[in-house]
Structures are given as structure tokens and as C-alpha cells.
Image (cartoon, rainbow, N blue to C red):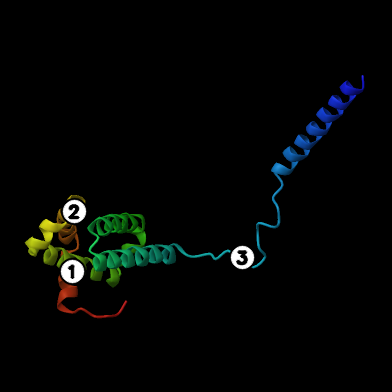
Amino acid sequence: ASSSEESSSEESASSDESVVRDQNRWVMSDDSESEDDVRVVKSAKERSMEAFDNHISNIRNGMKNRDFLKIQSEFDDLGKAMVKAKKMLDAGIPKKIIRIMVDLEDYVKERLADKAAFKKLSASNGRALNRMKLTMRKNSKQYEKLMEEYRKNPSTGD
């Protein structure tokens, strides 16, 4: 009889623990949230400009490392960010975006002109470079006037 009492008391103890655990599951602990963390509210324009800056810096980094896969993916992401921020861009495309497009177009032409280096590229990097050439050609048509204007007067502002 004593062994059955012990097992029933163990069962009730374990069931009590599970009830407490279930009740605590939905209670948020104050330890995880610091009092110093203040939520920063940014406007849509600030968020999109920050996204543009991140993509542009990643593209420039890829240009330094000659990582055409990274350049291609970041340029695609920049294009998606531009579509997402269409309302903001209706007022005018920031010069930094035009500057990166011009720089990237020149960079791709320069890399394609060096046939020996192109043949040494990995297959995936070579495909990315060719795809980048086609993407740049497509975007050049869309932003041709702005890019020509920038080439005539490459100001360092913005």
C-alpha cells in the first residue's frame, strides 16, 4: 500500500509541475526585455534609404572582391527595394542609385573586356557576370536619361 501511495504522490507532483509550467508558458519574463532598449520608429523613406545604402555598400564590396554572384544578387535585391519604394521614388531617384548603376555598368563592361580574366572565372561567376550584363542593358534603357545626365555632371553630392 505504501508503494502505491508513493507512486500516486509522484504522479500528483509531476502533474502539478506540468500545470505550473503550462501557466508560465504564456507569461513573458521581464528578464528578456531590457529597459534600455528603445524602439526606434523610422519613416518609410528612412527605411527604404537605409535598404538602398545596404545594397549599394554590398555591391561595392562585391566589386572590390570581384564576386559577381554577390553583385548580381544584391543588384536584384536593390531592384526589388526600388519597386517596393515606388511611391518614394516617384519624387525622383536618389543620385546614389544612379551613381551605382553608372559605376556598375562601367565595371561590367571593363570586366567583360578582359577576356583572359573572364575565362579564368568560375562557371557560376561567369554566368553571373553575363547575367549582370543583360540586367544592366535592361536597366540602362529604363534610366538612360538619368545615367547620361550623371555621366555629364558626376557630382559627389547625395
Q: Residue furthest top?
A: 1
Q: Is residue 37 left or right of residue 88?
A: right
Q: Quadrant of the N terminus?
A: top right
* Closer-to-camera residue (29/2): 2
User: Eyeballing the image, is 149 above or below 9?
Assistant: below
Q: Is residue 119 left or right of residue 89?
A: left
Q: Which residue position holds label 2?
A: 122
Q: Residue at x 55, y 66 (%)?
A: 40
Q: Is residue 15 left or right of residue 119?
A: right
SS category of the residue bearing label 3: loop
Query: Can residue 91 be seen?
Result: no
Give the percent coordinates (x, y) of residue 8: 85, 25
Q: Which residue position holds label 3?
A: 37
SS category of the residue bearing label 2: loop
Q: Residues within 10 Å of mark 1 (few under 14, many from 20)?
A: many
CA–CA distance in space, label 1 to label 2: 31 Å
Which of the two labelled residues, at mark 3 and mark 2, occupies the earlier sequence position? 3
Q: Residue at x 75, y 35 (%)?
A: 18
SS category of the residue bearing label 1: helix
For badge 1, the amino acid type reads: Met
For badge 2, the amino acid type reads: Ser
CA–CA distance in space, label 3 to label 1: 42 Å
Which of the two labelled residues, at mark 3 and mark 1, occupies the earlier sequence position? 3
Q: Quadrant of the C terminus?
A: bottom left
Determine which quarter of the picture holds residue 34. bottom right
Q: Residues within 10 Å of mark 2 (few under 14, many from 20)?
A: few
Q: Residue at x 41, y 65 (%)?
A: 45
Q: Which residue position holds label 1?
A: 147
